[in-house]
Amino acid sequence: MGGRLQRLLWPILGLPAIVWIVLFFLVPLYVVFCVSFGEVDPIFRTPIPVWNPLEWRFDQVVVVWDRLVGPDNFYLPPVLRTLYYVVIAVVACLVISFPVAYFAARYAGRYRALVLALLVAPFWISYMMRMLAWINLLQPDGLVNAVITMGGVVPLDVNWLSGNPYTVVLGLIYGYVPYMILPLFAALDRINPSLLEAARDLGAGSFDLFRRVVLPMSMPGVIAGTLLVALPMMGDYFTTDMLSKSPSTSMIGNLINLSIATPGQSGQAGALLILLLLVLLLPMIWYTRSTAKAEVRS
């Protein structure tokens, strides 16, 4: 009897999480599938979900696919632009976060809790409020232009909010860099200091120490941080809406948001969401498999 209860202990403890995932992830995802593979009311242009998978129609998916790779491929530029923005922003987040995380893990000492609190502090403020703050800073008469023009002495006129890609990338970096710092800190904090001392005793310089010890042992944090940053960036639409409002900087999230707001295109929005989900599912599966293999080897 005791062995049976012990075997049932972890399934019972995991039951609330399973119920939560089913109710708030799988059921809404099934609704998205039913809308995407459903029909559109010809008069009111409202979506008509088809709940029976055997009766699903793929008209909306064909339309989205044609707009991606067909002759009228006006969906393709935002998709490529999203990949371009995300790659640059993720690399920049990694370059910024690694020294900060290394300092917090190795040199913060008794101030480590304070450093971590300061890193988490931006999460206490609404993302919209933080973007509004950037709008005030980047206005033509804002603080950023006042600094780079030295109060108007240098004749330099930069309109940051007129559909500039670098402004959108800057907003992505600022908005998501804490998601990179925390996994990196967790990975770097687990490195045994005796390994670093042993490498120095064997004659390793600073570069070799980083390349042969620190970087390989921090790779789980690098991979986790990259996924935590890249996945929400792929669906982000709010940053470019706030800092650009230009079709020239629109991303995949903007296409989905626009399709939802357009009568008769909810199915296309769902199809875009499914395609985005399939793309994001591949790195998640790869990360899960690589993590499982690393645990088996250890």
Image (tube, rainbow, N blue to C red):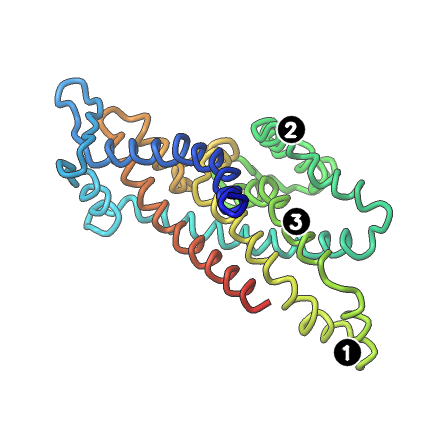
User: Which callout, 1 or 3, points at the residue further toward the start of the chain?
Assistant: 3
Quadrant of the rendered image containing residue 129: top right
In the image as oriented, which residue stretches furthest toward the front?
A: 1
Q: Picture coordinates of residue 44 (x, y %)?
A: 18, 18
User: Which callout, 1 or 2, points at the residue further toward the start of the chain?
Assistant: 2
Q: Is residue 285 above or below residue 139?
A: below
Cα distance, mark 1 to mark 3? Answer: 26 Å
Quadrant of the rendered image containing residue 195: bottom right
Q: Classify mark 2: helix, strand or loop.
A: loop
Rendered residue at 66%/52% (across/down): 97
Do labels 1 and 3 touch, CB within 8 Å? no
Residue tagged 3: 181
What amino acid does circle 3 point to?
Ile
What amino acid does circle 2 point to?
Ile
Residue tagged 1: 204
What amino acid does circle 1 point to?
Ala
Determine if residue 162 is in view: no
Rendered residue at 51%/51% (across/down): 227
- Between residue 95 and residue 180, name the one nearer to us: 180
- Between residue 101 and residue 19, name the one nearer to us: 19
Residue tagged 2: 125
Q: Picture coordinates of residue 229 (x, y %)?
A: 54, 47
- Between residue 267 and residue 81, name the one nearer to us: 267
